[in-house]
Image (cartoon, helix red, strand yellow):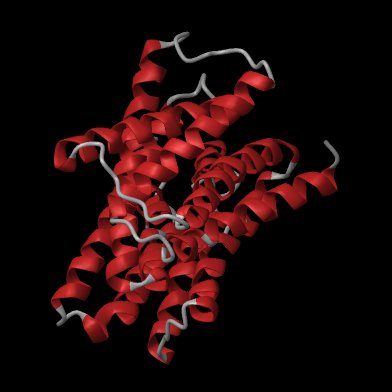
Amino acid sequence: MNVKESYFKYFAALLMFGMNGIVASYIALTSYEIVFTRTLIGSLLLIAIYALTRQKVHLLQNKKHTLCLIISGIAMGTSWMFLYEAYQRIGVSMASLAYYCGPVIVMILAPILFRENLTWAKVVGFLAVLVGMFCVNAQSLNELKTTLGLFCGIMSAVMYAFMVIFNKKAKSITGLENSMWQLLTSFLTVAVFVGVKQGFVIQIESGKWIPILVLGVFNTGIGCYFYFSAIGDLPVQTVAICGYLEPLSAVVFSVFFLRESMTIIQVIGAVLILGGAAFGELFHSHSNKVSAIVRFSRSI
């Protein structure tokens, strides 16, 4: 694959991920039903692509890595259920910003879990994100609906952190195979939740399948395939810097397509969240461990 094609696939994947909340807003299902259909369709597509490309299976070569990947998949499915609930309660822009605190949580935990040094850049980035979260949500914390939505957004970030941490430990399972097994595990996690809660009966009105298929096939299946087939040919620094196109596009798309409004204070908060995360991450981008986290964290 040439470099131009890799760039095209990478940017296309980021924009697809940034459109997730927009597409989901047109689906008349509950948050967990949306995640159920998304992970089902996406995992089936990745399985088909993996089979057609005849790649080797490394899942069972290391039991410890397999367990870590399973835990990571469970965390991803749980994270998405929280995220899509936050979409419905506080809107795509606010939920996306809360969700993107996940990489910062990983960054702060890295000294404990991965024996990395807690640099001044990480501390400054973390403080900037905290101030940004306050600016984004301070005006509406007195509303119950917003408070619950913010809680879901923060929990999606926490589960995101678990997802990245345990995925990083599954070192022998990489690339498209990693994404395929993780997405399949996420589907099984959500399926168990849906089955216990309401059984496997999801009512979808006639003619309402288009946004569901778009989210499952394009935003999830093809998006992950584009992402994992491109990052191997791109510099880590490029992946890290350009990866912030995803949350930025999610905010811009929500304002443009959904007419979600943001005050000046909230815009400043958004800049602090994205800028703080980027600052803390990129000033430590020479670390192989952090680079691995960066590469995977853009896959969702």
Toward the front, the furthest residue is: 206
Q: Is residue 142 left or right of residue 173?
A: left
135, 252: nearer the viewer: 252
222, 144: nearer the viewer: 222
Q: Is residue 201 above or below residue 272?
A: above
Q: Is residue 156 left or right of residue 26?
A: left
In the picture, the quarter occupied by the N terminus is: top right
Toward the bottom, the furthest residue is: 264
Name the residue at 66% across, 42% down.
Answer: 226
Name the residue at 34% across, 20% down.
Answer: 67
268, 124: nearer the viewer: 268
Residue 199 shows in this picture: yes
- Could you say where residue 228 lies in the image, as x and y percent from the top left? 63, 37
Q: Is residue 146 above or below residue 86?
A: below
Q: Is residue 173 above or below residue 24?
A: above
**In the figure, residue 153 lies in which quadrant?**
bottom left
Residue 112 shows in this picture: no
- Could you say where residue 241 lies in the image, as x and y percent from the top left? 63, 58
Q: Is residue 57 left or right of residue 135?
A: right
**In the figure, residue 65 lies in which quadrant?**
top left
Name the residue at 63% across, 28% down.
Answer: 49
- Could you say where residue 5 lies in the image, as x and y percent from the top left? 81, 46
- Could you say where residue 184 lies in the image, as x and y percent from the top left? 42, 30
Name the residue at 24% across, 67% down.
Answer: 149
Toward the top, the furthest residue is: 61
**In the figure, residue 45 lies in which quadrant?**
top right
Q: Is residue 283 above or below residue 202?
A: below
